[in-house]
Every structure is written in structure tokens, then in C-alpha cells.
Image (cartoon, grey):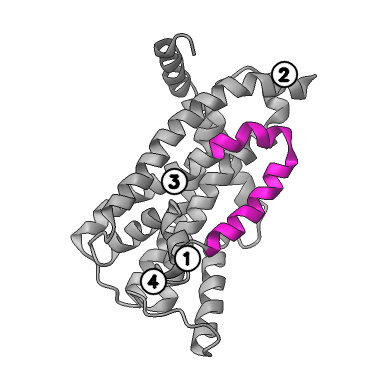
Amino acid sequence: MRHPLRLFQMMWLDLLASRELAWQLMVRDINTKYRQSILGFFWAFLPAIVMATGFTLAQSAGVVNIGKTSIPYPAYVMFSMTLWQTFVEALNGPVQAVTSAKVMLARVNFPREALVLAKLGEVFFNFGIKLILIIGLFLWFKIPVTASVILAPVALIHLVLLGTFFGVLLAPAGMLYQDFTMGLTLATSLWLFITPVVYPVPTQGLFGTIVKLNPVTPLLVAIRELATTGVISDPTSFWIASLIGAVGLLLAWISYRLAMPFVVEKISS
């Protein structure tokens, strides 16, 4: 930290040097994940379909009053759920990567960025599979799209950066203590309920304020709006959340590089 320019130069060089290893790790992880599964790629769709079916039945029966959504409700939930899944995968990826690579980290010296890059590649690969469901939804429900839909991938990248920021920040601690890995599952389950995945953004009350303060909200809503209405309803919050993700990821990356040598030394002793 005494020579920040040298630090950034080393970070950049290590990032470039880690590309080939990251590619190999990504291919290995994807093959392992889907080769040992009977349902295979269907697992990428299943959570969104189950969630949409459950909430659609509950709304039809009058058990819950969701309110009016901009697109047919089953499509609304499935589309939003795929975006939420992508965010959670980006968050969990770095923690899972360093935890599963403990032995390799202790024995082999390689750019630690390769683990994070591999998981990022896996996140985008999984979203590519989910995209088939999204396109199918738009065709089935005849949802019109605007020219702004071409900007939706940019907002999606911002959402992934935000998730990666939290994941990289927690990765060193997650490598030391299993509590972080188990706690993430609980935290993301609670986080889902303050994110407008199965309901529109509330405009009033304390719950509405909490939902709006959630940094995932403006990014997820922006992707949904760019793909449907073509207009981002709250651009200020979108750019604030994007800035949090980008700056936070840079700071988390620095923290990750500084912390990992000590963490690896501790698990090796």
C-alpha cells in the first residue's frame, strides 16, 4: 500500500496472467456441475419455475395480494428470479471458489484472481442458459420489447459486479470460517424478501424504504425495465448502486490480495 501505482500494476498483470488458468477452472467446474446431474441444464431454470408457479397459484387463490405488475405475473416472477439467481451466484462464487481450493492455494503459487475470474465466467455461462427461458417467456406471453433491450446486458454486468464485490470481500473470511459460507445462504434468503422479485417496488411505508435502500433493487428493476418498458424509472439510484458495485469491487480486490497470503499461511500451519 506504500506504492499504490506498483500495486495496481501488479494487480493488472496478475489479472492478465490468470486468464488461462481461469478458463481451465471454469470448464472443469461447469463439466463437474452438469455431468453429475440427471436434470443437467434444467437446474438453471427450475428455481425460477418453481417460484413462479408457487406465487402465481397463491395470487390466483387470493392468499397473497401482489399488486399490478408491468408484465404477466408468471413471466414477472420467472424473469426477476433468474436475475436474482445471477446476483446470488456472483456473490457466492468467490467464497465457494477459495473454500474449495484450499489445498491448491496452500501448495501452489498462482494468481489468486484466477479463482474469481473462473466463477465470473461460470455466472455468465449459467445466465446464457437462463436466457433461453427468458426468451421463451417473452415469446409465450407476447411481451413487447423496445430498442433499449440492447442496454439490458450492461445493467446485468453492473448487477454481477455488485454481487462479486460482496463475494470477494467475504472470500478470505469464508476460507477461514465455515460460518460465513453457511451464513451466506441464510443472508441471501432474507435478502430475497427485501428485493422486488415477486412483488413490484413498494412506494410507501418502512418496508418500501428498506426495499429502495437495497442496492440490488435499482439494478434488478433497471434490467427488467430496459427489457420491457425501455425506460429506467429511477436512474439516480441505478447509477449510485452501480458506483457502489464498481468502487466496492476495486476496494474488495485490494483487500483480497492483501489478506490472502495471511489466510493461506494460517490454513497451511
Labels 3 & 4 near each other (Cβ < 8 A): no
**Which kind of residue does numbered mark 1 sit on?**
Leu
Query: From mark 2 to mark 3, how far is it between C-alphas?
Result: 30 Å
Mark nearer the N terminus (1 vs 3): 3
Q: Residue at x 65, y 56 (%)?
A: 37
Mark nearer the N terminus (4 vs 1): 4
Per the image, label 2 sits on a secondary structure element best described as helix
Mark nearer the N terminus (3 vs 4): 4
Query: From mark 3 to mark 4, how far is it between C-alphas?
Result: 22 Å
Q: Which residues are magenta?
A: 167-193
Q: Most extreme residue toward the front, as rendered? A: 205
Q: Nearer the viewer, mark 4 or mark 1?
A: 1
Labels 2 & 4 near each other (Cβ < 8 A): no
- Asked if residue 60 shows in the view, the reply is yes
**Which kind of residue does numbered mark 4 sit on?**
Leu
Residue at the disc numbered 4: 137
Residue at the disc numbered 3: 160
Q: Quadrant of the C terminus?
A: top right
